Image (tube, helix red, strand yellow):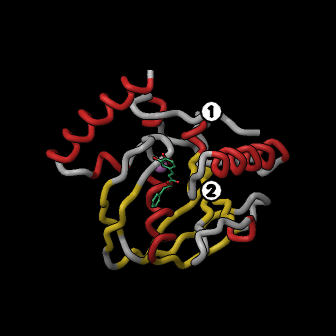
Amino acid sequence: MKLPIVVYPNKRLKAISKEVTEFDAKLHKFLDDMYDTMLESNGLGLAAIQVDVASRVLLLCIPDDEGEQSYDDLLEVINPKLSKMTGSMVYQEGCLSVPSFYEDIERYEKLTMIYFDRHGNEKVIEADGLLSVAIQHEIDHLDGKLFIEKLPYGRRKKFEKEYKKLQKAKK
Ligand code: QAP
Ligand code: CO
């Protein structure tokens, strides 16, 4: 079931999400609904707060070399913690909660993430490139942060102006 997406400037996106404690059927149904929502919206990542649930849950599904997204590459991430962040890279990011806007953002190039899967099993993954960038973007959501907050003052101003114009045109 597809869930409605919360979009900027909705203040719910600033909520600090809480750790998951129950790895039960309700969580599994929610993860399945998040997956439907992400795919139907053409996303490669989605955090729970983007569908108005303040839990430390996120999904990632990075397309392969042909640009295909497959269920086999789905990463369900619960209560993540980052370590061993190294290097830096710039990637043009977007966000389902900031529709039709893309900007270059600097992030760590490599990192290690410890997290739990849907059954409460602890996992470790080493990530670089797009996966590393996407992990950092989604974990920022769990802490109430959006990628546009990383823009320098001038570009942020330009964004606010263009975004307002776009929102008006949509109404
Ligand atoms: C986060 O973003 C991300 O504006 C996931 O009209 C993005 O899935 C991490 C999307 C880039 C790393 C690099 C955005 C779809 C999807 C839009 C997304 C839109 C339709 C964004
Ligand atoms: Co996002």
Q: Amino acid at mark 2?
A: Leu
Beta carbon of the mark 1 residue lies under 8 A of ligand 1: no
Q: Locate residue 45 relative to residue 137 in the image: left or right.
A: right
Q: Position of residue 113 (x, y in %)?
A: 54, 70
Dot label at residue 4 = 1
Of the pair 116 and 76, the residue shown nearer to us = 76
Residue 116: which quarter of the image? bottom right
The residue positioned 32% from the left and 55% from the top of the image is: 103
Of the pair 71 and 68, the residue shown nearer to us = 68
Q: Does dot 1 land on a helix, a strand or a loop?
A: loop
Q: Amino acid at mark 1?
A: Pro
Quarter holding the C terminus? top left
The residue positioned 60% from the left and 75% from the top of the image is: 66
Q: Position of residue 54 (x, y in %)?
A: 58, 38
Callout 2 crowding tier (Cα within 10 Å): few <14, some 14–19, many ≥20: many
Quarter holding the N terminus? top right
Q: Locate residue 30 relative to residue 55 in the image: left or right.
A: right
Dot label at residue 93 = none
Q: Locate residue 3 relative to residue 159 in the image: left or right.
A: right
Of all residues shown, which one is farthest toward the right?
A: 25
Of all residues shown, which one is farthest toward the left?
A: 154
Residue placed under numbered mark 2 in the picture: 59
Q: Position of residue 162 (x, y in %)?
A: 27, 36
Whole-Å distance between the Cαs marked 2 and 1?
A: 16 Å
Q: Does dot 2 land on a helix, a strand or a loop?
A: strand
Q: Point out the tag, 2 or 1, that comes first from the N-terminus.
A: 1
